[in-house]
Image (cartoon, grey):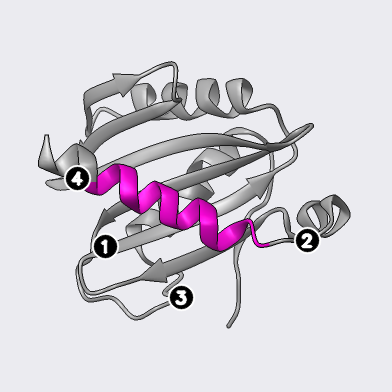
Amino acid sequence: MRRWKMVEWMMLGALWLSCTPTASAQWVAAARAVRHMRSSNVEVATVLLEAKPEGVYRVALETLAANSKVKISQRDEARRMVEFSESGNDYALQVDFVAAGISQLTIGAPSKGRPHGDPTAPVVQAVQRICGQMGVQCTPQSH
C-alpha cells in the first residue's frame, strides 16, 4: 500500500509540473516532447499527446501486453493507471485528461541514479514505445 501511495504522489507531481498555467495552444505545441524528471528516489517521463485519454490508455495496455518481458501487477481502469515490471524494474503508468483532445502520458519508476533528462532512461524509452504504437514521434526534450 505504501508503494501505491508513492506512485500516486509521483503522478500528481508530474501532472503539476507539466500543467503550469498556459494556454491550450501552447500545450499542443509542447506535445510530443518527452520530459524526464528525476529526484533522488523517483524518475518520471511524461508527454502530452493530441488524443483522448481512453485511447492512449488502451494503446499503452496493448503495448504492455505485447511485450513478453512485461508483467502487469495492478490495474485501475477508472484512473487509467497500471503498475508493471519489466526485466526486474518496477514502473507505474498513468494517462490523464488535460484538455479537450489532449492527454498526458506519465511513466514513473524508482530512480537508478541516471542524470536528469537522460534520453536513454527506461521511463523515457517506455513513453517513446507507446508513442510509436500510436504512430506519433515523441522525442526527449532537450534541456
Q: In this rendering, which labeled residue sits more in front, label 4 or label 1?
A: 1
Q: Mark 2 points at which residue?
A: 22
Which kind of residue does numbered mark 4 sit on? Answer: Asp
Which kind of residue does numbered mark 2 sit on? Answer: Thr
Residue located 46% across and 70% down the image: 119
Q: Mark 1 points at which residue?
A: 42
Q: What stretch is highlighted in magenta?
A: 6-20
- Quadrant location of the N terminus? top left
The tag earlier along the polypeptide, 4 or 2, is: 2
Q: In this rendering, which labeled residue sits more in front, label 4 or label 2?
A: 2
Q: Is 124 one of the magenta-colored residues?
A: no
Q: Is 10 one of the magenta-colored residues?
A: yes
Q: Residue 83 carries which label?
A: none
Alpha carbons under labels 4 and 1: distance apart: 11 Å
Mark 1 secondary-structure assignment: strand
Q: In this rendering, is residue 90 above or below 81?
A: below
Closest to the observer, 34 or 81: 81
- Quadrant location of the C terminus? bottom right
Q: In this rendering, is residue 119 above or below 95?
A: below
Q: Name the residue under label 4.
A: 90
Q: In this rendering, is residue 77 above or below 97?
A: above
Q: Where is residue 50 in the image (x, y as percent from the top left)?
A: 75, 39
Which kind of residue does numbered mark 1 sit on? Answer: Val
Mark 4 secondary-structure assignment: strand
Q: Residue furthest top?
A: 77
Q: Where is residue 61 in the image (x, y as percent from the top left)?
A: 43, 23
Residue located 65% across and 62% down the image: 20
Which kind of residue does numbered mark 3 sit on? Answer: Gly
